[in-house]
Amino acid sequence: MIRKIKFSEVGRRVLKWIPNSLTLCNSLCGFVAILYTLHAHEYRLDSIINSGSAMGVFNTVAILIFSAMIFDAADGFAARLLNAASMHGIQMDSLSDMVTFGVAPAVLVVVLTDFLYGWNISTPITVLLYICGSIYLGGAALRLATYNVAAIDGSGKKNPNWFSGIPSPGAAAALCVVVFLMPQFGTFFKEYPLILPFYAALLGILMVSKVPYLHAGRFFMSIRHNRKRLIATLLLLAAVIIFRLPGLAVIVTLYVLSGPAIGIYNLVNKKEQQIQ
């Protein structure tokens, strides 16, 4: 547990802007990511130099989205530490997440798929691409709206250590690691460019599903009092340090797969208990 720091009423009004400022940094990362994604259209000529420049744009966008995740985690930590949580901050957080983990990844998927097609997408594929992007965006919007309603009417989660459906930062991270690894699997994605938008659509569905996902924030914040979680965290950090992007990609992908795996396990276990 985080030991909260108590302040006077005036002090709280001032200090509440610390987490709000971090939330604004989150939204600014998303805004810049959207604008920067559009720069990829400057490299429409099919050449090695321009292709590499476009991929550089997409990698930068993915880094911006990951940077926003740091601000997203930091604002919640600061709000709890400074005892400065408020309904205003909760609303700001959801609005920022919608920009950074909803709109920005959807735009990234659409423009990147256009690039994989050589900037020459047919109309039917364009419609399909927009539908997939819309499913992802809609999933993020519905999830964040549900969170806001729960915060307003007080209907909290039964188990605060678990999410119902994959959180929007996790879905965005899953798309970003694909972008990071694309240079290593460029030929594969050139042959199957629709894999990315279909993956985005699947993540959109997972966001509004009842599939259980571990609350990563609470997991990492409790490592001081839990030796097993501390060891697991150190192993994850070691994997990222040693294997870098492939290690990060494996961790994020395993997190995406963990939800359906746990959901199936719970369903089978429940049926076995009913039979017994």
Image: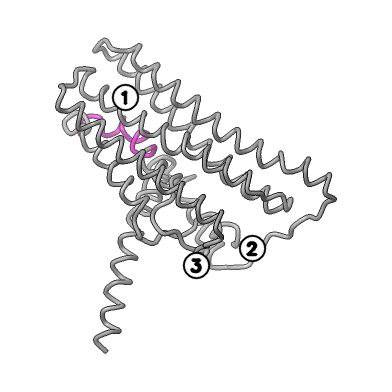
Where residue 34 appears, x then y in whole percent?
Answer: 44, 25
The answer to whether residue 42 is left or right of residue 271 is right
Query: Mark 3 or mark 2: which comes first in sequence?
Result: 3
Nearer the observer, 192 or 166: 166
- Residue type at mark 3: give it: Asn
Q: What residue is disc 3 on?
A: 159
Nearer the observer, 69 or 9: 9
The answer to whether residue 224 is left or right of residue 110 is right
Q: Quadrant of the C terminus?
A: bottom left
Name the colouring of the figure.
one colour
Identify the secondary structure beneath mark 2: helix
- Residue type at mark 2: give it: Arg
Residue at 40%, 16% (x, y): give it.
Answer: 39
Residues in magenta, as a range:
176-188
Q: Which mark is residue 257?
A: none
Nearer the observer, 192 or 194: 194
Q: Is residue 237 visible?
A: no
